[in-house]
Image (tube, helix red, strand yellow):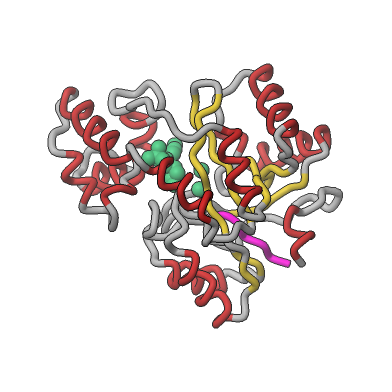
């Protein structure tokens, strides 16, 4: 089973359409696939149709932006019903504010001598209400301000950098209710990316369990190989099921392509087992 349960399309901040991502997943050997756009289910119908025409098993998914202890975390809703009304409404409310934040990011960058970024970034998104830092990053690279998108985050858009604009996303408790209510399983995305202290991490995992959470991403394109081992140990300690996903955004972007990650360690329970 080559499961890749985390990636993005043009519906959020990916570079390929859902159909193109499906074809690339299939070409990369993926046999169980999920498209998990940020805060948006608009690509699910197309993704499922493309997966089925290629003979790939499909799980509907979404990656939800959450504010916890003053910072942003991402929770993947796995195998959700994309038509569920409370989930659709919750995601709408979560997206709401991206446009205004985009304008504020543009102003913050103008203040450090980089003008017209909001207008520039808009050219990189299909939907102005979905504007994300990734679209700003692609614009800044193409405009010659940085050599790569990760360079943009390190210098301009990461937490504490001049173009960083704080934002309030959804609450963890709400996000968990939307996912469960839509028949899905919440999965903490790429925990290794969060800048929490050990005490904060323990509080996050405890709270997640209290709210009914039981799965985290272990092998993800957003972790280093050291972090695969670190979060495999976290999964063992807390009894979490484990997920695997490239977090693919586009060709040549990110650390790893669709279907190319190493397998989960044998002793962990894959989150997808219950759906097979
Ligand atoms: P936003 O939801 O607008 O805050 O944008 C977050 C997105 O930016 C993530 O989903 C990633 O695609 C991207 N991102 C975050 N940090 C980095 C980084 N260090 N390097 C490259 N992309 C990043
Ligand atoms: Mn992204
Ligand atoms: Mn993420
Ligand atoms: Mn992602």
Q: Is residue 125 above or below residue 3?
A: above
Q: Quadrant of residue 224?
A: top right
Q: Is residue 246 above or below residue 236?
A: below
Segment tinted magenta in the rendering? 1-6
Instruction: Name the dominant secondary structure of the magenta segment.
Output: loop
Work out whether residue 67 can be spotted. yes
Residue 11 shown in magenta: no
Q: What residue is drawn where x is 29% and y is 34%?
A: 101
Q: Is residue 168 above or below residue 275?
A: above
Q: What residue is drawn where x is 62% and y is 41%?
A: 176
Q: Is residue 211 left or right of residue 117?
A: right
Q: Is the N terminus in the top left, top right, bottom left or bottom right quadrant? A: bottom right
67 and 118: which one is in front? 67
Residue 192 is situated, as x and y percent measured from the top left of the image, at 61, 34
Residue 209 is situated, as x and y percent measured from the top left of the image, at 74, 34
Residue 33 is situated, as x and y percent measured from the top left of the image, at 60, 65
Q: Is residue 95 left or right of residue 139?
A: right
104 and 222: which one is in front? 104
Q: Is the C terminus in the top left, top right, bottom left or bottom right quadrant? A: bottom right
Q: What residue is drawn where x is 62% and y is 80%?
A: 55
Q: Is residue 160 left or right of residue 182?
A: left
Counting labels gives 0
Q: Residue furthest front?
A: 85
Q: What residue is drawn where x is 65% and y is 53%?
A: 184
Work out whether residue 251 can be spotted. no
Q: Quadrant of residue 177?
A: top right
Residue 2 shown in magenta: yes
Residue 260 is situated, as x and y percent measured from the top left of the image, at 61, 60
């Amino acid at each position: 089973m080559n499961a890749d349960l985390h990636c993005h399309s043009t519906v959020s901040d990916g570079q390929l359409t859902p159909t193109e991502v499906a074809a690339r997943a299939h070409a990369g050997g993926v046999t169980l696939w999920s498209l998990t756009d940020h805060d948006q289910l608009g690509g699910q119908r197309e993704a499922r149709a493309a997966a089925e025409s290629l003979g790939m098993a499909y799980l509907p998914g979404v990656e939800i932006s959450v504010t916890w202890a003053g910072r942003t975390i991402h929770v993947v809703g796995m195998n959700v019903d994309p038509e569920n009304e409370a989930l659709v409404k919750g995601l709408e409310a979560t997206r709401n504010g991206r446009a205004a934040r985009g304008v504020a990011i543009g102003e913050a960058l103008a203040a450090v001598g980089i003008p017209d970024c909001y207008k520039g970034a808009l050219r990189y998104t299909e939907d102005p209400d979905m504007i994300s830092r990734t679209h700003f990053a692609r614009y800044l690279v193409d405009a010659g301000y940085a050599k790569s998108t990760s360079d943009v985050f390190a210098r301009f858009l990461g937490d504490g950098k001049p173009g960083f604009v704080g934002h309030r996303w959804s609450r963890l408790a709400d996000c968990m209710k939307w996912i469960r209510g839509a028949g899905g399983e919440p999965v903490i995305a790429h925990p290794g990316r969060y800048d929490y202290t050990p005490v904060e991490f323990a509080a996050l995992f405890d709270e997640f369990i209290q709210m009914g959470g039981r799965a985290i991403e272990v092998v993800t394109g957003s972790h280093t190989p050291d972090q695969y081992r670190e979060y495999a140990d976290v999964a063992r300690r807390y009894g979490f099921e484990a997920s695997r996903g490239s977090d693919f955004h586009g060709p040549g972007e990110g650390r790893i392509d669709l279907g190319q990650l190493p397998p989960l360690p044998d002793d962990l329970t894959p989150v997808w087992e219950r759906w097979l």
